[in-house]
Image (cartoon, rainbow, N blue to C red):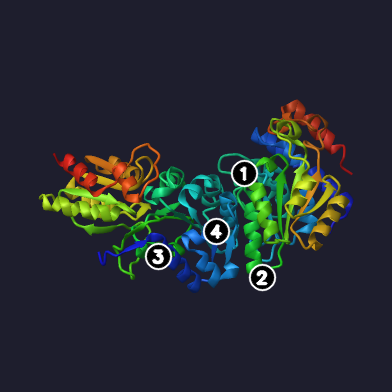
Amino acid sequence: MIDNAQMQDLALCVRLDVLEMIRAAGSGHPGGSFSSVETLVELYWNVMNNRPEEPRWGGRDRFILSKGHACPALYSVLARRGYFDPAELLTLRKFGSRLQGHPNMLVLPGLDASTGSLGQGLSIACGIAHGLRLDGRKSRVFCLLGDGELQEGSVWEAAMTASHYNLKHLTAIVDRNRVQLDGPVSEVMEIEPLVDKWLAFGWDVIVADGHSFPSLEKAFEHCSETPFPSVILADTVKGKGVSFMENTCLWHGRCPDEKEYAAAVSEIQGGLS
Amino acid sequence: MKDLNLKPTREGYVEGIMQAGRENSRVVVVEGDVSRSIGSNSFREAFPDRFFNLGVSEQDMLGEAAGLALEGFIPFVGTYGVFIAGRAWDQIRTGICYMNLDVRIAGAHGGLSVGPDGATHQALEDVALMRVLPNMKILVPADSNQTRASVLASIEAEGPVYIRFGRNPVPQLYTSDEKVKIGRGNLLIDGNDVTLVACGAMVSLSIEAASILNGRGISAGVIDMISVKPLDRELLLGQVEKTGAVVVAEDHQSTGGLFCAVAETLALEMPVPMDTVSVRDSFGTSGSPSEVMAKFGLTASAIVEKAQRLLQ
């Protein structure tokens, strides 16, 4: 267990990794990676029961990155957690790399599914949850979705399945950064009211500040005790941590130039304790 | 080649999953509100904990199956072929084939032989959609016994398998001890003049066609190419080397299915005159299976005619 200040420093280091990885790759998705950083750090350091030295350990908690394009943040978290050598991070998206443009579980340890086609992760998570129940395992299943991703109808098919079969050891987290590739979610295709929607689908809903570790910790604790499948609506900022990337669709999938990179690094480094 | 009593192939599917369920506790069934139609509701009665009906939600069914396979189960996902292969194609591609998961996909109601339900329910593109996917294996059994054997053979396979079967009763061509091997076809009749390659409902019609051709002095061989992918290349080339002429018969569009698989193989390795008896870029229509199949030329006489024309 590490304290809140260390978690905050970790989050900044993950953001620096993401920037450097995307710069080295020449492409990638900084906006949605930055908004999901605290959720991933909280999960991998404070919530999930896992063994980086034994990535397929049967008793582990499972994690599905349904918004697969945020994989730079996940790769950084996995490397820093000990699943593979952080030196490999700079191979992101390069020919021959295990760090594919979207996650490929067959080549990289620590991934519980290959993802990248939006709208599939929650169904896979439900199947895993059913499998764990059949095997009598106590492991939990976590699935991180984008808010724009909720426009995929298949997400709501899975939402029905989870409540119909009461998969209470399944927790979804919606990275509610309110911006998608083409613009604000509310302008592209409104998905609110999300609390009402998930409640109507039979889920336990909790709203959290997706950039606050104490808030996320409380939310995950709540989810571990609820008798229903649970969803954390994590209010986040797209591009969080770099002022000129925040709250804009321009940085959904763009690589910074040298000047932008330097400015972003110095802004993030300024926050390190 | 045994008794020619009629039986729907889907009954073999149910017999197969029941036997697999008894023999292997990792076998589970994922359904989409057609279990009473396909018959897989008997699996639910026998193994209620291993049966998941997800309602009318093909995309979720395939994702669910992927998750179960990730936990080491062997899920059989079944619904009508037109929906399972079409609606959930992306889930099959990225959620199953990309991870090479042990999911068995049952496409019921394949082809025109669905009959009265009409074009919306007649899967004529499913084999093509599955065949383009890396890691996917495809079995198109011709009768109930072969369907049961296909289910059992799929248990041993690594990675995803698509099993396509029909709705209406077809002649029983195989005995109850029939074994299926993925990648292997069956040489039903050895021929010297022309090779008829067929799968599914067209196998019995090809046997009928071979008999008519034989009566006219033409030695027609028949291959039951149950394994559309991987194709039994050795068996195909061995026969075609002798006959030098091929007619492919399938209850499917002529693009992307068995005809294409055979044509691709022969174009590269042994180009010979070929023709096809299949649906040519068209949707089906309502009617009795025999009426609809006759309208689109899926008949023994069409196979005879094309074979004779090839040999002229």
Q: Secondary structure at mark 1?
A: loop
Q: Nearer the viewer, mark 2 or mark 3?
A: 3
Q: Are marks 1 and 4 in contact (CB under 8 Å)?
A: no
Residue B31 image label: 4
Q: Secondary structure at mark 3?
A: helix
Number of residues whose C-alpha sits closer than 10 Å to that of mark 1, classed few (under 14), some (14–19) or many (20 or more) = many
Number of residues whose C-alpha sits closer than 10 Å to that of mark 2, classed few (under 14), some (14–19) or many (20 or more) = few
Q: Secondary structure at mark 4?
A: strand
**Subunit that carries the residue with mark 3:** B
Q: Nearer the viewer, mark 3 or mark 1?
A: 3
**Subunit that carries the residue with mark 2:** A
Alpha carbons under labels 4 and 3: distance apart? 18 Å
Find residue B51 and report its horizontal and vertical position in percent. Answer: 57, 65
Q: Which residue is mark 1?
A: A116
Give, as a three-letter code, the residue at label 4: Glu
Whether labels 2 and 1 share one chain: yes
Find residue A206 and report its horizontal and vertical position in percent. Answer: 82, 51
Q: Secondary structure at mark 2?
A: loop
Query: As drawn, is B59 to the left or to the right of B222?
Result: right
Query: As drawn, is B184 to the left or to the right of B48?
Result: left
Residue A231 position (above or below residue B180): above
Give, as a three-letter code, the residue at label 2: Gly
Q: Nearer the viewer, mark 2 or mark 1?
A: 2
